[in-house]
C-alpha cells in the first residue's frame, strides 16, 4: 500500500513560534506538494518540489518555506506562525503526471 | 490560470437516493481527477478521466468527462451513509494539480 505520512494530526502553536510540518512518502515519488485547505477556499498550493533540494512556489507561498534534503521527506516551515495560518495542511506526492497521494492532514491551530 | 467550479457546494440526500456533482473548468481539461475526503482527513483518490466522452465506474460511483473536456460529473447511485464526505475535483496539465472548492455531501437514513 502506498503511504504518505504526516507527523502530526493536530498541532497547537503560539503566534511567533517556528513550526515544522513533516511529510514522508514511501513510494519513491519524485514530486511532493504542500497544500492548505480552508472552508470556502478549497485546497491551495503552497510549495512543491520535483526533486531533492529543489523547490517551487505555489499559489500562496508567503509566510512559508520548505526543505527537501531527501527524496522521501518534504518539510513545510512556518518561520513565525500567525493566526491566519490556522488551517488544515495536506501533503501529497506523485510520480510524473500520475495520481496524487495524500497524507491524512495536519490541523494546525495558531493561538 | 485555470479554475474549477463545483456545484452544488452542499448536498443533503436521503439514503437510497441518486445524486450528481458537477465540475466545470475554465479551460480544456487534460486530466480530471475525483477525490473524496472524509471530514478532517486526507483525500482519497476515486477516479481519473482523460479522454473526451470517457466514463468510469467504481461500485456505485460513476464519473464522466464531456466531449469538449470542460465539464465532468460524478454520479452516485443509491446513496449510503458511507458516501458522506467532501468530493473534490482536481485538474492539471503539468505535474501540479488545482482543485475545486468541493461539494459537501450528507446522507441521512
Image: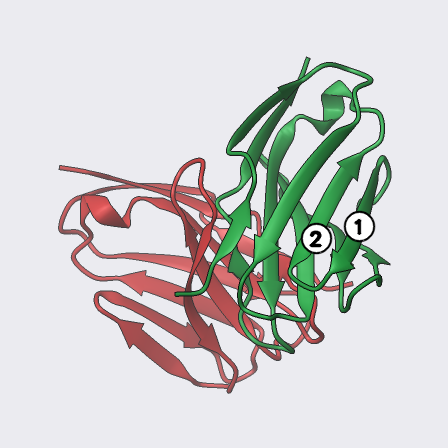
In percent of width and height, residue A91 lies at 61, 50
Contact, mark 2 vs mark 1 (Cβ under 8 Å) = yes
Q: Residue at x 56, y 79 (%)?
A: B69
Display colour scheme: by chain
Tell me, what hue is chain B? red
Q: Residue at x 40, y 75 (%)?
A: B64
Which residue is pictured at 50% across the width and 85% down the height?
B67
Quadrant for the C terminus of chain B in the image: top left
In the rendered structure, find residue B30 and report the number of the disc placed on it.
none
Alpha carbons under labels 2 and 1: distance apart: 6 Å
For residue A74, which numbered disc appears in the image? 2
Q: Earlier in the sequence, mark 2 or mark 1?
A: 1
**Image x and y of residue A87, in percent:** 63, 31
The correct choice, above or below, for B31 with respect to A7 in the image is below
Q: Secondary structure at mark 2?
A: strand
**Looking at the figure, which quarter contains the N terminus of chain B?**
bottom right
Residue B73 in view in this figure: yes
User: Depth check: A9 or B33 in front?
Assistant: A9
For residue B30, what is the image quadrant? bottom right
Q: Spot the green chain and give its letter.
A: A
The residue at 50%/86% (across/down) is B52
What number of labels is visible?
A: 2
Q: Which residue is mark 1?
A: A67
Residue A12: x, y in percent?
61, 19
* Rendered image quadrant of residue A80: top right
Chain at tag 1: A
Q: Is residue A59 visible?
A: no
Query: Is A73 situated left or right of A107 in this image?
Result: right
Amino acid at each position: 500500500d502506498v503511504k504518505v505520512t504526516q507527523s502530526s494530526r493536530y498541532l497547537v502553536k503560539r503566534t511567533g513560534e517556528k513550526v515544522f510540518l513533516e511529510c514522508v512518502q514511501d513510494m519513491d515519488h519524485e514530486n511532493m506538494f504542500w497544500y492548505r485547505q480552508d472552508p470556502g477556499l478549497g485546497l491551495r498550493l503552497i510549495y512543491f518540489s520535483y526533486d531533492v533540494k529543489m523547490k517551487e512556489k505555489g499559489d500562496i507561498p508567503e509566510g512559508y518555506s520548505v526543505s527537501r534534503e531527501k527524496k522521501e521527506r518534504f518539510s513545510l516551515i512556518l518561520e513565525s506562525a500567525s493566526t491566519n495560518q490556522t488551517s488544515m495542511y495536506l501533503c501529497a506526492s506523485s510520480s510524473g503526471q500520475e495520481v496524487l497521494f495524500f497524507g491524512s492532514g495536519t490541523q494546525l491551530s495558531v493561538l | 490560470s485555470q479554475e474549477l467550479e463545483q456545484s452544488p457546494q452542499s448536498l443533503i440526500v436521503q439514503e437510497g437516493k441518486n445524486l450528481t456533482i458537477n465540475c466545470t473548468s475554465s479551460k480544456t481539461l487534460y486530466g480530471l481527477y475525483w477525490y473524496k475526503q472524509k471530514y478532517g482527513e486526507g483525500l482519497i483518490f476515486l477516479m481519473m478521466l482523460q479522454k473526451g466522452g470517457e466514463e468510469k465506474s467504481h461500485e456505485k460511483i460513476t464519473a464522466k468527462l464531456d466531449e469538449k473536456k470542460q465539464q465532468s460529473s460524478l454520479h452516485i447511485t443509491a446513496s449510503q451513509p458511507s458516501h458522506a464526505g467532501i468530493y473534490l475535483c482536481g485538474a492539471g496539465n503539468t505535474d501540479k494539480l488545482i482543485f475545486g472548492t468541493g461539494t459537501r455531501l450528507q446522507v441521512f437514513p
